[in-house]
DNA sequence: CGATGTCATGACATCGGTGTCATATATGCA
DNA sequence: TGCATATATGACACCGATGTCATGACATCG
């Protein structure tokens, strides 16, 4: 591989001048520049980032650690749309002329220290720490050596974090359902220990309140439990209880649950959306687009979260954070309306004036 | 960040001795070793991989390029279980004390040269080139500078490649169905231009032949087309034609299609698996495990492919390829049997003696 | 006892860029 | 015309490892 010395020799200049042509950090005569550029092209020259990193003390690398935290998947396999997260982050990082280095622990928390050690050796400028579902984490000390942004998770020390706006997402979904004429809105929730559960429940309640609808607790049931074997029966029972409260639509905690609910409702002879509407959460396109009818769902904006986290991290590294920048940022996703939700005749209902609720 | 000089000073030895302690490439007195190790620990020393790379001319980096090829997604979004591929590759690469560098073009082929340029600057030792679905690709010259392994794709120059064993997977699935008593096996295929289509069709035919069953062309219909808007109607029609041939089971080209077929069959009042069995392909757990009943599916072994590709690449880099190693390797996945397939009473059928068909 | 070998260690150069400083010529302005 | 700047370029050191070679202290052997 050609070096800067080879280029300098070929162009008849000093290495430093070649460096100047590349970096544009000092004026170079037009003729000289052309000669250098010709030499670089003919030698197929590519500067060594190792040498650069060494001299400049800036590696141009960002580390991302995924699959990192859980020792075993306490809940279910998320299906890993994490790749969108990687893509979102990578795009932003590439724009800053940096490169993404990734490490995946394969869910074995014990491997994290070794992976972080690798990051240290590469002198990564910052770390993105990605959790597989919205949760709290405890960070080991080694991580705090670097600028870090948590993604899909947070800790108790106000470490910068980028999180999905679960409350807002559920609010927007339920609010949209109400605008489409629904009044009795069933809600099959996540297991109660999940962070997202509480937030989404709040969004649900706020949407009702904002629209002047009274909460019927019978309509809200825990839909899934961590133990897969039991889950289905429990889902059946939960659905049963919700249906007795006569909802016109059922919000499911996620698209996978909605997929099951499709099957369960059909077994009861209910047609979607004619007899009852259904909504999901996550907007896993693999599911939502291919269910029949298409599933209305609140999008978990993974790509946007990845991009936002990368952006935040770069600002931290560059010292260009806005002074008022909060440690935690929420990223909202759109509601994707598909055919699983039917608008109801609203002539007999009176939409209360919408009040803004912060 | 502490350097080897700091460690040397703290331990009262020369930098070279510290280097020897780290690399074990020459004998070091036990006392000296302990002093050096203590110094390293107290300074929280981490050697600079940039300096190492520079001196040794080995970067310890492997580049992976994903989302690389398609300008627009000609077919549908794959749902990107690519993350499993990344994980599989990363695991193997970490074991070899190397680090995975990733670049994602976001489907914009025009960005590939820039990404490869980044790889060159980092002096990656090899490249994994990942396609989003099984296909043929044309490689630009720049890629051939490096050792490279294609993943999920191949070219016309016998570039090393790791591919899913589509023929074998479909064979194993259909063979398994036959062993479970099925004789009339419907097959809703991929669009014909897909590489996987031809291979799976071959597997289907071979399974029939191996078991002495005659092919009924009516049972095989193209199930999907690249234009999403039309797809559904065409799938309905295709399913209709297949059903007229009275199958006891329907193989779908992928799990997404199977998910739709579930809905379509139910609309016709057919219960799965009581009235008819269904199988998919891909084994996207997000779908297959959560459909009710669980979907039997042939697994696309992404994690294994990633691992195998990384392994192959490392052998190429290390010059330790087995002499007989073929350029293209097929990776087989298991058939995951779930409740969507019902074993049929086989007392009235006569399983022909299984013949091995290579 | 001297030659040879092993152990243990350090001095020094080197990998490929870039920051610092020096130098030489050209230009602007009073 | 003379001095302050700006332009254009090079010499040299340095970033942090490690390969090469040299050296001194012992141990071994004939």
Image (spheres, coloured by chain):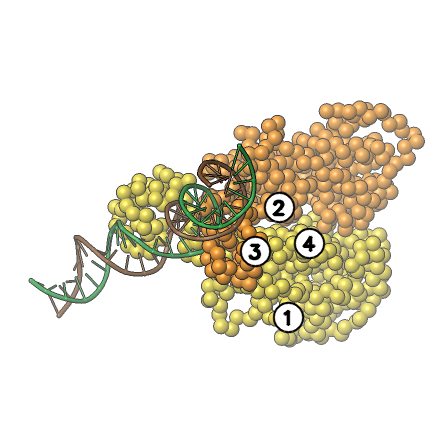
Chain colours: A yellow, B orange, C brown, D green
Badge 4 density bin: few <14, some 14–19, many ≥20, Cα 10 Å: some
What residue appears at the point 61 percent right and 27 percent down from the top-left corner? Answer: B324
> What residue did someone put label 4 on?
A108
Q: Are marks 1 and 2 on the same chain?
A: no
In three-dimensional space, the C-alpha distance between marks 1 and 2, rounded to whole angstroms, equals 33 Å
Q: Residue furthest right?
A: B347
Q: Are marks 1 and 4 on the same chain?
A: yes
Residue B334 versus residue A121 in the image, above or below: above
SS at badge 2: helix
Chain bearing tag 4 is A
Question: Does residue A356 appear in this view?
Answer: yes
Badge 1 density bin: few <14, some 14–19, many ≥20, Cα 10 Å: few
Labelled pair 3, 1 in contact (Cβ < 8 Å): no
- C23 displayed left or right of A77: left
Give the label, 3 or 4, closer to the camera: 3
- B60 displayed left or right of A132: left
> What residue did someone put label 3 on?
B31
Instruction: Please name whichever residue, B229 or B136, is drawn nearer the observer in this view of the structure.
Output: B136
Residue A251 on image: x %, y %: 74, 62
In three-dimensional space, the C-alpha distance between marks 3 and 1, rounded to whole angstroms, equals 43 Å
**Which label sits on residue A232?**
none
Chain bearing tag 2 is B
Residue A116 on image: x %, y %: 59, 56
> What residue did someone put label 1 on?
A156
SS at badge 4: loop
> What residue did someone put label 2 on?
B95
Give the label, 1 or 4, closer to the camera: 4
Q: Earlier in the sequence, mark 1 or mark 4?
A: 4
Labelled pair 3, 2 in contact (Cβ < 8 Å): no
């Amino acid at each position: 591989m050609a070096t800067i010395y080879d280029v300098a020799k070929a162009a008849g200049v000093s290495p430093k001048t070649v460096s100047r042509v590349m970096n544009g950090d000092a004026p170079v005569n037009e003729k000289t520049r052309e000669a250098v550029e010709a030499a670089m092209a003919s030698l197929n020259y590519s500067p060594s980032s190792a040498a650069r990193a060494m001299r400049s003390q800036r590696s141009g690398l960002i580390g991302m650690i995924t699959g990192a935290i859980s020792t075993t998947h306490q809940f279910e396999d998320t299906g890993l749309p994490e790749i969108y997260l990687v893509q979102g982050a990578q795009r932003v990082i590439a724009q800053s002329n940096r490169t993404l280095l990734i490490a995946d622990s394969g869910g074995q928390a014990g491997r994290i220290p070794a992976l972080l050690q690798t990051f240290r050796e590469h002198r990564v400028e910052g770390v993105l720490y990605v959790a597989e579902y919205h949760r709290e984490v405890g960070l080991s000390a080694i991580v705090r050596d670097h600028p870090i942004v948590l993604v899909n998770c947070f800790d108790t020390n106000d470490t910068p974090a980028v999180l999905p706006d679960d409350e807002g997402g559920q609010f927007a979904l339920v609010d949209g359902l109400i605008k489409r004429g629904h009044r009795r809105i069933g809600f099959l929730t996540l297991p109660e220990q999940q962070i997202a559960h509480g937030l989404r429940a709040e969004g649900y309640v706020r949407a009702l309140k904002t629209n002047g609808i009274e909460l019927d607790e019978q309509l809200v049931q825990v839909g899934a439990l961590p133990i897969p074997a039991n889950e289905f029966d429990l889902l059946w029972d939960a659905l049963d209880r919700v249906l007795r409260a006569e909802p016109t639509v059922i919000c499911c905690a996620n698209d996978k649950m909605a997929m099951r609910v499709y099957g369960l409702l059909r077994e009861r002879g209910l047609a979607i959306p004619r007899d009852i509407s259904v909504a999901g959460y996550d907007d896993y396109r693999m599911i939502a687009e291919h269910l029949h009818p298409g599933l209305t769902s609140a999008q978990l904006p993974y790509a946007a979260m990845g991009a936002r986290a990368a952006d935040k991290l770069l600002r931290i590294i560059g010292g260009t954070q806005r002074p008022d920048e909060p440690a935690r940022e929420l990223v909202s996703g759109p509601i994707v309306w598909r055919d699983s939700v039917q608008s109801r005749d609203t002539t007999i209902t009176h939409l209360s004036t919408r009040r803004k609720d912060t």
